[in-house]
Structures are given as structure tokens and as C-alpha cells.
Image (cartoon, coloured by chain):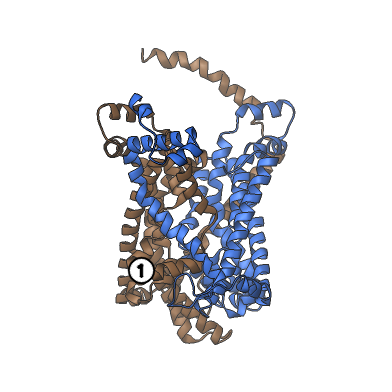
Chain colours: A brown, B blue
Amino acid sequence: MVTVAPGTAGPKTTPPVRARRSRGIRPTRGYRVFQAVNGVVLTLVVIVTLYPFVNIVARSLSDEAPIIAGKVNLVPQGFNLTAYRLVMSDPMFWTNYRNTVVYTVVATAISIVLTTCYAYVLSKHQLRGRGVLVGIAVFTMFFSGGLIPNYVLITSLGMKNSIWAVVLPNAINVFNLLVMKAFFESLPVELEEAAAVDGLSTYGTLLRIVLPLSKAIIATMLLFYAVSFWNSWFTAFLYLDQQDLLPVTVYLRNLIAGATGAQSAGGVAESDAVQAAATIQAVTIVLTTLPILAVYPFIQRFFVSGVMLGAVKG
Amino acid sequence: MTSETLRPPPATPGQAAANPAPRRRRRRSWRRSLRRDWQLYSLAVVPLLFFLVFRYLPMIGNVIAFRRFSPGGSVFGEYWVGLRYFRLFLADPTFWQVFTNTLVLGTLTLLFCFPLPIVLALLLNEVRARRLKRFVQSVSYLPHFLSIVIVAAMVMQLLSMDGSVNQLVRGLGGEGVPFLQQPGWFRAIYVSSEVWQTVGWGTILYLAALTTIDENLYEAARIDGANRWRQTWHVTLPGIRPTMVTLLILNIGTFMAVGFEKILLLYNPLTYPTADVISTYLFRLGFESSNFSYAAAIGLFEAVIGLILVLGANTISRRTVGTSLW
């Protein structure tokens, strides 16, 4: 059997290959020129995308003098790790880094529970009032209360300078919600019907039947939320005044805002103090970006599949 | 079932007599579905509370745009002032300047950040080598995963007096330019950083749409003598049109809220003439001058325009090309 199969398959598969070759890929000169140009353009895209990263790393590893002289591009000049030692010996940097981790974990946990529950409810087509429930969520995508009323709300709820101001106001992302809803809708109805017949409650069905089947989408959603909370800075910037509560993104923001303030005050001529900050800034950027870069190769495909699922069905 | 239909009518006879059957039936079936699906509904309670508190309460909170608000006083303001704040900002020359800036930045962003992903997706689609294509894709998605703070910090480093861009300028024989201090450069800087961060990621949906185009259409086009370019024009582009329209509508939806966070990080008083947009202006009004009511009025105006733009774009596209968000 096994030996016969390739023998019979062989002659059958060759004609299509030949046909395909004769059909389209007889590259004309114009097409070959296009391919060459295309290659150049895409190479440029890669270079332009990566350059800032390389540049930042080079600056972070350089001595200050060559940076001021404007000599650092791709390769570190006067290699040293002083700036790294300086940043890493700042206890506030680590405090804020830890805050970022805590906020990300707590916010992601809350988000995933709320999003899963609501998405599951929205995926039940026979449910009365489902349209209204969907509408309540979708409307917020296109109209929001705005900055000032939000601020007044958070302040009057007494959440200023607490972790809740960071983790609660953005707990449900409607886009993620719709992606999850689409996924739940794609699950076979029979499974849940069978579970119901076997006497499982709705909670039981969700926990024991639906969620085990949804591991992939839950992983994707976890990543979506985690990355967005990890990267967020504005809510923290707005609602947290105490330095030891800030996430690391706001630490970096204060660093660069301080530098620009000094720059605009001192005019074009930059002072040494600002320059000293240049390496520090570069190091902080590198240290903040590092976790994302480290996990990026592994999470990228989850993101892509998540976006596609949302596009196809959402 | 029978016990349901035999149940006596509700206790308020007057109401039941006024609207006889439909309302009673509706209420009863509501009761029935509540009894049947209460567990499902219970799962929706906490998320609904979230939407109510953090999304709809602020919308109601916009009443302070019509009332006098004093910090520390009532959340909904002290007394009615009608449209006073709206009249105020409509007569405010700074408002019109930031309004213009918003339109200009929004239009530029739309002009570059909407078509460029399509172009990049088409170019990627022509790449024969799988590995190469995958590599370019992975690299181009990367900036999407960075915090805006990091992007802003990178922009500042690249454009500082000793940064790479100024080295290039000097290398070409020019004078160093303090890019971030000059209003004339802000728009270019903002749009190019936006392109850098979003274009790669923006290709995903187009690449997905491209794979769904029927291969037979290309075959037919070839038989009709269409060359590569005409195949792209007559088969590929129409094939991804629904995706294009959907993304265009979504882009229009964010038109008014142009990159608030990024501008807040990149601008400074020297670049206000081109960089200051509605959202940053109201941010300063609210948090630097504590004019909460005035800022809320501007915010409400912005949000309403945004909503009108989305609804308008959606209606137009449904009428003309038959694609709409809902």
C-alpha cells in the first residue's frame, strides 16, 4: 500500500505543476524589474523599522562624549555600562518596574474574566435582550464620555492614587470582546446542549465544556490585554501622583519630559545635564522595551490570529 | 406551557385593559426567559456594571459642560449655565487654531496611514520566497507592540541635535536642526512616526483578505490578456475592497481623536502652533487651568463630531458600496 501510493500519485501530480508553470510564471522583463524594485523597497522597510532599535541600543552602550559629538549611529562608541549601572541602581526604577508587573497582572486577570463572561452571554443567539447587550458594548466604541467627565468620575469614586484607577476603567476592550464572542459563536452548539441534557448548569457548561475548548483564544486575549496594560501610561499619569505608585512607562515619560523641558528652556544649545540624561534615557528605553522584545517572537502569531478572527467574524 | 397560559392576568387591571394582549405576553415571556436563563444573565451583571459606571456615567457626566463646575463641589456641577461654554469656545481663537490643527493632522494621518498598509500588503503579496516574506512581516509588526512612550522617546533621541537625523543633515552639508523645537517640522514628525508604528501591523487584515481571493479570477484575467498590473487593478483591489472600506470607516472614527497621547508626549510650547489639537488643548484647560466645564464642553463637541463622522461614513459606504460596520 505504502509503496504503491507515491507511484500512483506521481504521474497525477506532475501535469498540474507543468500547467502552473506555463500558465503564469513566464516572467516578463517588466516583472523581473518589479521583483528587484520590490526587494529593494522591502529591504528599506526592514532597515527603517529596525534602525531606531539598533540606534537606541548603541546609544545606551556608549560613552557620553561621542554621543554629544554626534558620532553614535549603529555601533556603540566608547563602550561602557556606566549608564546601565546608574539606572539599575535607582530603587525608584525597580519600584516602578514592579508596579508595571503588578498592574499588568491584576488588570489582565480582571479583564479576562469580565470579557469572557460577557462574550459568552453575547454569543447566545436565543437569549432575549441580546441585541441590547451587544449595543450597549458597541456604542462605547464610537462615543465616549471624554477625558474630563472620566477624571471627575474616578476622582469622586476615590480611586485616585490607587491601583483601581489603573486597572478598572479599561477592563473591557470592546474589540477583544467581539473577537471572543465570534469565537464562542463558532463552537458547536451540540456540545453545550449535550452538557445541558446531562444536567450541567450554565456555569458548569462554561467552566467545564466551553473554557477548555477555548484555551487558544483565551491565551490570545491574555496577550492582547497584557501588552496593552504593560504599555499604557496615560491613565497612570493622570490618576497617580505618588512617584512610588507609577508604572515604568510613566517613569520613562517623566525622564523624557524633563529633558525636553530643559531643552526648550535652554533653547537650542543643550546643557551638559541634559546630555547626561541622553544615555540614561537610552538605557531606560532599552530596559523597558526588553521584555516585549524578548517575548515578541513567541506571541506574534497569537496576535495575528486574534486580529484575523476579529476581522472575519466581528 | 398550559400553566403559563392559564395564569390569571396581572394585578393592574387598568393597564392590562389599556394594552391588552401584547404587553402582557411580552412581560410574561420576559419572565419566562429570566427564569430559564437567569444564570446567563447573572454572568452579564458585572460587565454591565462596568459599562454603566466607566462608560455611560461619564457620558452623563458631560452635563457639567452645561453647568458651572467647581472642583471639590458636586460631581454634576453647581447650576445651569446653558450653552455658555459652547459660545465661549466658539468665540475662542485658540479653539479654532487647535480645531484646524486637528483637521490637518487627522487628514494627513488618514492620507498616509490608510493607503500605505495596502501598498505594503500588495508588495508583500508579490514576494515569492516564503521565508523572506515572513521575516519582513515579523519585523514590520514589531513597532506596534511598543508603548507610545517608548516611541516618543525614540523619536526624541533620533531627532535630537546629536541624533542620527541631524548627523545625516550635517553629513549632507547642512546645519543641525532642532526638529522638535520647530513648529514647521511637527506634522512631518508626527505622521512619519505614526507610519513607522502602524503600517506593518495594518497589513495583516489585507494579507488575510488577499489569500481569500479566488485563484480562478486571476486565471480568467490572464486569459483575457491582463498583465500583472491590470490583474492587481481589476482583481486584487476589488477583492480586498470590503476590508478597505471597513478599515476606512474605523480610521474615520478616530479622526477627531488624533494621537492624543503621542502629541502630548512630543509637543512643547514652541510647537503649539502646529501641534496643539483639540484633545491636548482641553487637557491643558482641564488640568493646568482647572476649567473643567469649559474643557468638558470642548470634549463633548469633539466626541459628537467623531460620532457623526462614523455614522456618516458608515451610511455612505452602505449606500454606495454595500459594506458597513453593522
| Residue B317 point in image, percent of width and height | 66, 44
Residue A149 vertical placement versus A293 (above, below) = below
The one nearer the camera, B306 or A41, is B306
Q: Is residue B112 left or right of residue B74?
A: right
Residue B23 vertical placement versus A67 (above, below) = above
Q: Residue at x 54, y 66 (%)?
A: B260
The one nearer the camera, A115 or A26, is A115
**Residue at far front of view:** B14
Name the quarter where the N terminus of chain B is drawn.
Answer: top left
| Residue B158 point in image, percent of width and height | 54, 70
Kindly indicate the quadrant of the structure image that contains residue B169: bottom right
- Residue underneath mark 1: A159
Q: Amino acid at mark 1?
A: Met
| Residue A38 point in image, percent of width and height | 63, 47
The one nearer the camera, A62 or B42, is B42
**For numbered disc 1, what is the local secondary structure?**
loop
Kindly indicate the quadrant of the structure image that contains residue A17: top right
**Residue at far right of view:** B225
Q: Residue at x 33, y 37 (%)?
A: B35
Name the quarter where the C terminus of chain B is drawn.
Answer: top right
Residue B55 vertical placement versus A196 (above, below) = below
The one nearer the camera, B87 or B3, is B3
Kindly indicate the quadrant of the structure image that contains residue B194: bottom right
Q: On what subunit does the disc labeled 1 rest? A: A
Question: Within 10 angstroms of label 1, few (less than 14), some, or many (20 or more) residues?
Answer: some
